[in-house]
Amino acid sequence: LLNCDIILTSPEDILSFDLLTIDKCRRNEFDIGRSMLTVQRWLKKYVRDVLDESDEILHVKYHLIYSVGGQQQVDGGAKRWKTIQTILELVKKHAVNISKCFYVNVCYKPSERESTFPQFRLQSYEPFPLLCQKIANDEIDSRNYRYADKLIILSFILEAHSSVEYLVHKFPRLDLQLFLIIRDLLSSEVLLVAFTNRYRVNYGVNPSSSFNRLMAVPFRAKDVVTDRTGFSHPD
């Protein structure tokens, strides 16, 4: 590059090169890794990024995640998804009773078919603790634990700040991972966020004076009208 040449590349290529350098070192191919590291340091020192239409290029939907190393199973393995599905089935089971106890704070509409999930939305935090208690009791009762152990597990699941140290030597590693998953759904209020979220899709006429159309168009975000959509008039 003595003649001030230009290298055209993409962020994905540079990131792949960086990760490949790490991978070579992990494979004990230190000579190749050392050479690649030298090139990598030179690039970071002298190369400059030029972005055209940066608002589109840097949008979160274009971000890529590269994996390095061998494939590993997530905590809980296949039982992770089965546990989450079981929790949702328990929500479906107790939705009617919760809606009757908190009819002001719960929006509930039974499904027409038994296999489908009913319309169920929490409009405040008030019904959530009782729902968590019912779900936790049913989930733990379905497992073959002693009564004293069930009390310890319930305390751990329903209290977000309880320590896992009391359970480490009592239960297998897989069970601990499943307990943590259930606690995230209940005590960490992941389930609350899911059932209080209301998808807002508004339609209406754009109030902007520059928008000279009388057709209703969808909103691309909360209270932000989409100017160009398939619903807009070609004129």
Image (cartoon, grey):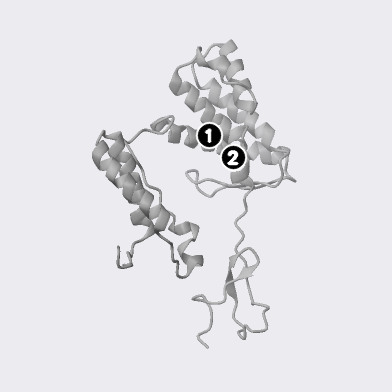
Q: Is residue 34 above or below residue 59?
A: above
Question: Tag 1: Cα neighbours inside 10 Å, few (<14), some, or many (≥20)?
Answer: many
Q: Earlier in the sequence, mark 2 or mark 1?
A: 1
| Camera sees residue 15 | no
Residue with the most extreme bottom position: 235
Q: Is residue 77 above or below residue 143?
A: below
Q: Nearer the viewer, residue 122 or 165?
A: 165
Three-letter residue code for mark 2: Leu
Where residue 191 sits: x, y (%)? 59, 40
Q: Residue at x 51, y 75 (%)?
A: 229
Q: Residue at x 65, y 26 (%)?
A: 161
Label 2: which secondary element: helix
Left or right of 126, for residue 233: left
Residue at the spot of label 1: 87
Q: CA distance from mark 2 to mark 1?
A: 9 Å
**Which is more foreground, mark 2 or mark 1?**
2
Where residue 209 sits: x, y (%)? 68, 83
Three-letter residue code for mark 1: Ile
Q: Residue at x 35, y 33 (%)?
A: 72
Where residue 43 sits: x, y (%)? 37, 54
Quarter holding the N terminus? bottom left
Left or right of 36, for residue 82: right
Q: Residue at x 65, y 66 (%)?
A: 223
- The circle on residue 109 is none
